[in-house]
Image (spheres, rainbow, N blue to C red):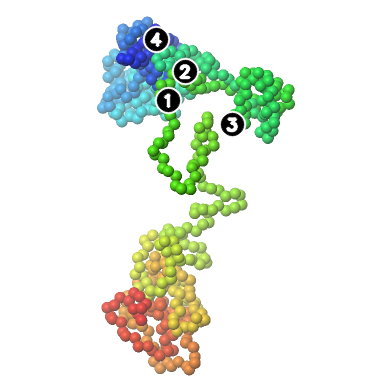
C-alpha cells in the first residue's frame, strides 16, 4: 500500500504539491488524474525517492522507498519510457537491471515475451518507436515481479491492440492483489480500467473516491425525450406539462428534450395524461470525461484561445463575399463535413463533367474513335481549331516528328473499285482550273494519332509506310501530254478520284498531293512554261514545286 501524509513540494517560489494526503490500496487499479502541471509526476517522483518532499512523507508498505530492502524487487515503475541507453539492445538493457537487483537472466526473456518484444530483443533501443519504448519500460517495471507498480502514461504511443493489452494487464495485476497506481489523461481509458480515482489540481487533492461515485457527485443524470417530429405542438405541450410538474426541460439540436428533476416513470405518466405520443424515453448519465471537466475547470493552468490569424488573412478582392459559417460549427459533437466527392446526377439523368462516363477524352493518350465514326481533327495548341494549311508533298509527308506514344497507323487497303479511295487517301484541294461547282472526291481524314504528319495536313498512303526516297522525276512537275488539244468552248477536265489514288499509291514515284489535281487538268490545257527545279533543292512546300 502507498500512503502519503501532508506531502508538500516547493521549487523556489513555486509550490508543485501542497498538503497532499491519500492512500493507494492493493487489489484495485487506482487512477491518478489531474490537469497538466497539477503535480502528478512530482508526486510519483517523491513516492520513488527521486525527489525529497519539502514537508510530509510518503511510504510504501510502511517504509520510505530508500529504506526498502531490495526495492526493485518490491516496487516497479515506469516514469519515462525514453530513459534508456540508445546503444544497448533491449535484452541487454533489461539484463543490466536484472543483474543490479539480483534477478536471474531467464526473467529477462520472460518479460520480453510478456510485452511482445521477443522478436526485437537483439535490436538497439534507439531505433524503437514510441510504442515499443513504452513496452520496454513496462517490461522493466515487471522485471522483479513487484507487489507495487507505478505507471505514468503507460498507453502513450500504443496502438489500439497495445492499449487493450495494457488495460487487461493492469486488471490482471490488481486481481492478483498487487497495488497498481496509474496516471493518465485518457478519461475514456480510465473509465474502463480504474476502480478508484485520486484527482488533484494545482497540487491539492480534489477527489478520492470510486469511479462511479465520482461521476455521480460531479454530474447529473437526465432523461432524453423525443416526440413525433411532424407534430411540433406535441413537443410544446409536453414541455409545459413537465415544467409544471417540477422538471427542468432543455431543447436539443436534433429536436429532442433533455429533462432533469423527474424520474422516468413520472415522465411517462405525464406524457400519458397529456395524450402525447413518445418516440423516445431513455435515461442518460454523464461520462467520466464530463464529470472530470466539471470538477477541474477551475484548476486548469493552460487554456487555449481562438486563433485570430492577425496579419495573416489576405484582404478580400473587390466584390467578393466573405465565407459563410458552417452550420453547427463550434457546437458540441460537431465534426467537419467530409471532403467533396464526385457529383452524381439524379436518377435518370446522365452525370456531367470531364470524367463522366461516355465522354470522349482528348489528348495524346485518347483511344481512337469507334469504327464508322468520322474522326475530327484535333484542336490546336491553344484549344482552338487549327486553321487548314496547304497539303505537303507526299514525298515529305513523313518528315514530321512522330509521337512515340501514338498507336500505329493502319495500313492503306487496296483499291477495290475504280473511283473508290482508301481511308488514307488525302483529300484533293480544288485547283484554279476546276470550277467551284465541280465535285471533288475527298476521302475521310486520317486517324488523329498517326503522328507522321501535322494534324491539319492529311498523309497519303505512302506516308504510312515511311518517307519515300526523293528523285528528280518525283520532284519535277507533271509534263503535258504531247498532241493533246482542248476542244473549243469545252470546260476544263475534272480529275477522277481513281487517278489521284493510283498516283498516290505508287511507292516508286509519288506525286505531290496538292499538284495531283492540277497535273490532271493540265493534260487538256496548253503546257505552261515552268523552269526546272534545282536538283539539290529540298521540296517541302507546294510553291517550290510550282
Residue tagged by mark 3?
253
Q: Nearer the viewer, mark 2 or mark 1?
A: 1
Mark found first going from the N terminus, 3 or 1: 3
Dividing the picture into quarters, in which one does residue 27 lie? top left
Gap in angstroms between the C-alphas marked 2 and 1? 27 Å
* Residue at horizontal 38 percent and vertical 79 percent from the top: 511
Mark found first going from the N terminus, 4 or 3: 4
Q: Position of residue 249 (x, y in %)?
A: 62, 24
Q: Residues within 10 Å of mark 4 (few under 14, many from 20)?
A: some
Q: Nearer the viewer, mark 3 or mark 1?
A: 1
Q: Position of residue 276 (x, y in %)?
A: 71, 27
Q: Residues within 10 Å of mark 2 (few under 14, many from 20)?
A: many
Residue tagged by mark 1?
303
Q: Are marks 1 and 4 in contact (CB under 8 Å)?
A: no
Q: Position of residue 250 (x, y in %)?
A: 61, 25
Q: Are marks 2 and 1 in contact (CB under 8 Å)?
A: no
Q: Nearer the viewer, residue 35 or 113?
A: 35
Mark found first going from the N terminus, 4 or 2: 4
* Residue at horizontal 41 percent and vertical 40 percent from the top: 313
Q: Note whether 26 is above or below 394 in the view shown.
A: above
Gap in angstroms between the C-alphas marked 3 and 2? 33 Å
Picture quarter with the N terminus: top left
Q: Position of residue 332 (x, y in %)?
A: 52, 29
Q: Nearer the viewer, mark 3 or mark 2?
A: 3
| Residue 269 appears left or right of 224 | right
Residue tagged by mark 4?
19
Residue 483 visible to the viewer:
yes
Amino acid at each position: 500500500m502507498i500512503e502519503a501524509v501532508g506531502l508538500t513540494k516547493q521549487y523556489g517560489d513555486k509550490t508543485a504539491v501542497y498538503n497532499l494526503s491519500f492512500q493507494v490500496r492493493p487489489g484495485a487499479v487506482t487512477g491518478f488524474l489531474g490537469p497538466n502541471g497539477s503535480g502528478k509526476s512530482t508526486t510519483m517522483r517523491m513516492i520513488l525517492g527521486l525527489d525529497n518532499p519539502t514537508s510530509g512523507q510518503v511510504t510504501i508498505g510502511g517504509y520510505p522507498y530508500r529504506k526498502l530492502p531490495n526495492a526493485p524487487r518490491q516496487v516497479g515503475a515506469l516514469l519515462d519510457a525514453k530513459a534508456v541507453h540508445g546503444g544497448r539492445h533491449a535484452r541487454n538493457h533489461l539484463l543490466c537491471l536484472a543483474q543490479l537487483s539480483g534477478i536471474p537472466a531467464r526473467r529477462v526473456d520472460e518479460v520480453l515475451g510478456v510485452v511482445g518484444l521477443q522478436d526485437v530483443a537483439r535490436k538497439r533501443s534507439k531505433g524503437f518507436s514510441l510504442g515499443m519504448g513504452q513496452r520496454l519500460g513496462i517490461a522493466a517495471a515487471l522485471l522483479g515481479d513487484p507487489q507495487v507498480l507505478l505507471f505514468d502514461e503507460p498507453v502513450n504511443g500504443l496502438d489500439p491492440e497495445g492499449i487493450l493489452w495494457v488495460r487487461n494487464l493492469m486488471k490482471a495485476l490488481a486481481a492478483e492483489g498487487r497495488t497498481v497506481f496509474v496516471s493518465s489523461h485518457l478519461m475514456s481509458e480510465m473509465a474502463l480500467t480504474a476502480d478508484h480515482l485520486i484527482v488533484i489540481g494545482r497540487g491539492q487533492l480534489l477527489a478520492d473516491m470510486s469511479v462511479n461515485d465520482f461521476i455521480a457527485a460531479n454530474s447529473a443524470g437526465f432523461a432524453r425525450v423525443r416526440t413525433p417530429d411532424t407534430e411540433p405542438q406535441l413537443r410544446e405541450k409536453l414541455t409545459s406539462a413537465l415544467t409544471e410538474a417540477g422538471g427542468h426541460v432543455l431543447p436539443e439540436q436534433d429536436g429532442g428534450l433533455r429533462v432533469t428533476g423527474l424520474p422516468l416513470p413520472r415522465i411517462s405518466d405525464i406524457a400519458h395524461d397529456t395524450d402525447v405520443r413518445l418516440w423516445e424515453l431513455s435515461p442518460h448519465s454523464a461520462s467520466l470525461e464530463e464529470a472530470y471537466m466539471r470538477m477541474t475547470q477551475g484548476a486548469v493552468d493552460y487554456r487555449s484561445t481562438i486563433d485570430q490569424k492577425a496579419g495573416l488573412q489576405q484582404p478580400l478582392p473587390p466584390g467578393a463575399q466573405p465565407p459563410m459559417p458552417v452550420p453547427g460549427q463550434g457546437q458540441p459533437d460537431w465534426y467537419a463535413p467530409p471532403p467533396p466527392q464526385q457529383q452524381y446526377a439524379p436518377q435518370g439523368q446522365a452525370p456531367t463533367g470531364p470524367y463522366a462516363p461516355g465522354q470522349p477524352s482528348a489528348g495524346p493518350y485518347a483511344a481512337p474513335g469507334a469504327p464508322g465514326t468520322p474522326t475530327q481533327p484535333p484542336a490546336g495548341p491553344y484549344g482552338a481549331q487549327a486553321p487548314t494549311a496547304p497539303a505537303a508533298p507526299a514525298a515529305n509527308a513523313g518528315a514530321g516528328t512522330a509521337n512515340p506514344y501514338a498507336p500505329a497507323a493502319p495500313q492503306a487497303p487496296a483499291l477495290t473499285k475504280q473511283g473508290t479511295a482508301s481511308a488514307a487517301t488525302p483529300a484533293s484541294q480544288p485547283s484554279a482550273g476546276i470550277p467551284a461547282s465541280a465535285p471533288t472526291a475527298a476521302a475521310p481524314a486520317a486517324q488523329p494519332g498517326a503522328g507522321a504528319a501535322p494534324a491539319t495536313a492529311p498523309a497519303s498512303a505512302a506516308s504510312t509506310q515511311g518517307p519515300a526516297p526523293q528523285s528528280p522525276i518525283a520532284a519535277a512537275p507533271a509534263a503535258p501530254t504531247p498532241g493533246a488539244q482542248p476542244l473549243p468552248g469545252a470546260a476544263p477536265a475534272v480529275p477522277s478520284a481513281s487517278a489521284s489514288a493510283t498516283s498516290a499509291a505508287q511507292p516508286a514515284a509519288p506525286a505531290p498531293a496538292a499538284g495531283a489535281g492540277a497535273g490532271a487538268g493540265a493534260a487538256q490545257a496548253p503546257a505552261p512554261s515552268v523552269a526546272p527545279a534545282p536538283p539539290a533543292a529540298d521540296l517541302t512546300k507546294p510553291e517550290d514545286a510550282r
